């Protein structure tokens, strides 16, 4: 093996080690993401269960109908102007400094004042 071949071999071995390290890091990230996803799925299932229980209690005790629930869901969905099946951020004005903000924040970015969020989950 001449010197050029030896240098090429060293270079290739270094690239192989770098690729193996990158692959190992990627594998760890995939495993962490998979674990996060599993936890989120469990939380979502639990929240769906709680929502269903709350809905059934409200419906049984107050006589609210499925149609009223569907209309309310649609009304809330459209508050941000987009029928996308989720609660989007709404434009707000800070009550203290008057600067613009949105409902995804609990406090003003500029002065730190508490913002009046339009709903508990926004
Ligand atoms: Zn402010």
Image (cartoon, grey):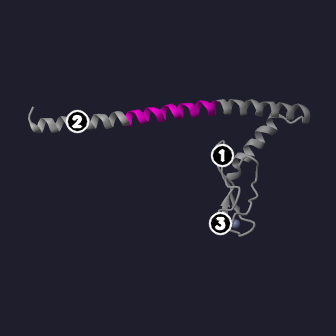
Say which quarter of the image contains residue 13: top left
View extreme (bottom): residue:
97
Q: Which residue is mark 3?
A: 110
CA distance separating discs 3 and 1: 30 Å
Residue under the image location 66 percent in, 43 percent down: 86
Is 24 in the magenta? Answer: yes
Q: Is mark 3 within 8 Å of ligand 1?
A: yes
Q: Quadrant of ligand 1?
A: bottom right
Residue under the image location 53 percent in, 31 percent down: 34
Who comes first in sequence, dot 2 or dot 3?
2
- SS assignment at label 3: loop
Q: How many marks?
A: 3
Who comes first in sequence, dot 3 or dot 1?
1
CA distance separating discs 2 and 3: 53 Å
Q: Is mark 1 within 8 Å of ligand 1?
A: no
Q: Quick one: 34 or 50, which is closer to the camera?
A: 34
- SS assignment at label 2: helix
Q: Which residue is mark 1?
A: 83
The image position of residue 21, as x and y in percent, is 36, 35
The nearer-to-camera label among 2 and 3 is 2
Look at the numbered discs 2 and 1 and tell me whether their residues touch, using CB distance below 8 Å: no
Look at the numbered discs 3 and 1 and tell me whether their residues touch, using CB distance below 8 Å: no
Q: Which residue is mark 2?
A: 12
Looking at the image, residue 83 lies above or below residue 5: below
Q: Quadrant of the N terminus?
A: top left
Looking at the image, residue 69 lies above or below residue 87: above
Is disc 1 surrounded by few (<14), some (14 to 19) or many (20+) residues within 10 Å?
some
């Amino acid at each position: 093996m001449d010197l050029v071949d030896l240098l090429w071999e060293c270079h290739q071995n270094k690239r192989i080690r770098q690729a193996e390290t990158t692959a190992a890091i990627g594998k760890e990230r995939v495993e962490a993401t998979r674990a996060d996803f599993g936890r989120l799925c469990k939380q979502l299932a639990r929240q769906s269960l709680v929502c269903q229980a709350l809905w059934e209690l409200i419906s049984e005790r107050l006589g609210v109908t499925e149609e009223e629930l569907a209309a309310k869901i649609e009304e809330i969905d459209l508050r941000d102007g987009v029928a996308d099946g989720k609660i989007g951020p709404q434009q707000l004005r800070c009550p203290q400094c008057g600067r613009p903000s949105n409902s995804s924040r609990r406090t003003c970015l500029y002065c730190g004042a508490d913002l009046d969020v339009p709903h508990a989950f926004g």
